[in-house]
Image (cartoon, rainbow, N blue to C red):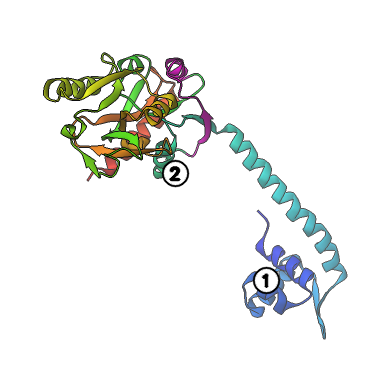
Amino acid sequence: MVDHRLRTFLCVADCGSLSRAARQLFLTPTAVMKQIDQLESRLGVKLVARTNRGVALTPAGESLYADGRELVAGAERAVERARRAAAQQRRAIRVGTSLLNPCKVFMDLWNRLGDRLPQYSLRIVPFEDDHRGILSVIERIGKDFDFIVGVCNSAMWLSRCDMLPLGRYRQCVALPEAHRLAGRAQLELDDLNGETLMMVRRGDSPVNDGLRDEIERNHPGIHLEDTEPFYDIDVFNRCAQTGRLLLSLECWRDVHPMLKTVLLNVDWAVPYGLLYAKDPPEEIAAVVGAVAESLEEEKP
């Protein structure tokens, strides 16, 4: 907004030397002097005079220096006000996050979108993973949150929100670090014979119901113990305290510091995705569309 030659003149005046100003501006002394000459020619006045000690300002230079400083400061204030005004107009995208449903996946997606959505900013909104209240959290999508990235194969969840699928997480087994199977890199269902395996009760997740059918049909030596339909930290604590196994997912590998998570070699991977309100407002639908388009472009 301010002529670069004026900024060069102010720097020369502050430094009192062409060579020192040149070093500060990453220019040659000749280039600095050329800009001063051009400014003097444009204004029709002499601004600086060379001396044995460097350069000194003429009366006209002193006057321009005082007014030029105010001009530059005013321009910088104007730019900052414009930026603040622009920021206030940006629509804040509210992203829910919790221990079991962290927002990092969304942040990675957002970073890959680049400059497609410059009119939006992000605001992180925490929530609790409480199996008694998680459905009320899902119902708040579109009210308190615009998005949650979550593991979602729940009929109860999907009756309350829509989902853009992002991928699948493999099934794992969480178990105490001292358990006989904790040192294994991968487990087969046969390895769990004689163990109690905690998993969500039947009826809400087709993937978990399918895995339960396979266990009950082909692996009767595994004792199944029902948990609540949605995990929270309490179920991981119960696993650590009782020594029982817990059907888990690879994304929850670091949820509990006293548990080891081992991959389970089964075909029942669980989908996860971007959860958003049914009939979302136009701007949220635009974000979903931009994410979907980006994912499509990344396909090999």
Tell whether position 132 is magenta: yes
SS label for mark 1: helix
Q: Read off the magenta span.
A: 118-142
Q: Position of residue 276 (x, y in %)?
A: 40, 23
Q: Which residue lies at the image location 82% right of the left edge and 83% below the top edge?
A: 53
Cα–Cα gap, marks 1 and 2: 33 Å
Amino acid marked by disc 1: Gln
Residue 229, relative to residue 100: is it above or below?
A: above
Label disc, if present, on residue 115 of the rendered structure: 2
Q: Residue furthest bottom?
A: 52
Image-quadrant location for residue 172: top left
Image-quadrant location for residue 164: top left
Foreground: 121 or 52? 121
Foreground: 198 or 134? 198
Residue 45, relative to residue 132: is it above or below?
A: below
Tell whether position 53 is magenta: no
Q: Position of residue 214 (x, y in %)?
A: 15, 23
Q: Which residue lies at the image location 14% right of the left edge and 25% below the top edge?
A: 219
SS label for mark 2: loop
Say few, some or many: other residues with alpha carbon within 10 Å of mark 1 (under 14 / 14 to 19 / 20 or more): few
**Can you identify the residue that label 1 sits on?**
24
Q: Position of residue 141 (x, y in %)?
A: 45, 20
Q: Which residue lies at the image location 44% right of the left edge and 15% below the top edge?
A: 132
